[in-house]
Amino acid sequence: MPVYQLKPLSREAIPGALSKAERYRLLGEPWQAESICRDVLAVDAPNQAARITLILSLTEQFDRGISAQSALDLIEELTDGYDRAYYSGIIHERRAIALFRHSDFRSGSAIYALFRHAMEWYEKAQALRPAGNDDPLLRWNACARFLTRHAQLSPAEERAEPVVSE
């Protein structure tokens, strides 16, 4: 398989490239947005907008086999505590939804756990949010409504250890 030398993006093109990445996400082509964000980060590694858009574009590909870990690995590179908490919630929520779309009844406890984990992250983000930003509350409420609507999703039952006697 050939290996291609990637062409570097100019720093002047970064704002336009990030705008294009957002449009590709809206067009349902997150792999294009991912590629653009990686190009931006190759020339401007600390760029937080590119990192957030990259995280979101990866979460939009969970249905296509992208792992949640690939998005989670980027969280620690976010400089703002609110962003780390909020986007951790997004990753877990979107992973839960992807699993829900592609699973059978046996995945209910895993889906439930992912939603609850997302809700915990949204609660952390709520405590760190800037004034007037209720985004974590909106996401928490959406998760709560999803779990209420799909009552078949429930936590794994605690299993007692088998009694071993002689």
Image (spheres, rainbow, N blue to C red):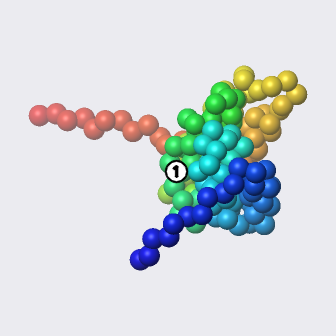
Residues 145 and 14: in front is: 14
Task: Say if 23 sits above or below 51 in the image.
Answer: below
- Mark 1: secondary structure: helix
| Outermost left residue | 166
Local crowd size for mark 1, using a 10 Å CA cut-off: few (<14), some (14–19), many (≥20): few
Q: How many circles with numbers are drawn on the protein? A: 1
Task: Place residue 57 in its image quadrant.
Answer: bottom right
Residue located 78% across and 60% down the image: 20
Q: Of residues 65 and 70, which is closer to you in this image?
A: 70
Q: Position of residue 94 (x, y in %)?
A: 64, 51
Residue at 66 percent across and 57 percent down: it is 9
In the rendered view of the protein, which quadrant contains the C terminus? top left
Q: Is residue 56 visible?
A: no
Q: Residue furthest bottom?
A: 1
Nearer to the camera, 166 or 124: 124
Compared across the picture, whether 5 is left or right of 80 comes to left
In-image side of 153 versus 24 (left or right): left
Describe residue 150's horizontal placement relative to residue 64 as left or right. right
Would you place residue 106 above or below residue 145 in this image?
Answer: below
Q: Between 30 and 152, which is closer to the camera in this rendering?
A: 30
User: What residue is rendered at 64% in x and 44% in y?
Assistant: 44
- Asked which quadrant contains residue 103, the reply is bottom right
Q: Which residue is mark 1?
A: 70
Tell me if 86 is positioned left or right of 155 in this view: right
Where residue 134 sits: x, y (%)?
A: 83, 32
Can residue 80 be seen here? The reply is yes
Q: Position of residue 84 (x, y in %)?
A: 63, 34
Which residue lies at the image location 67% right of the left edge and 41% below the top edge? 47
Give the amino acid type for the residue marked by disc 1 in the picture.
Ser
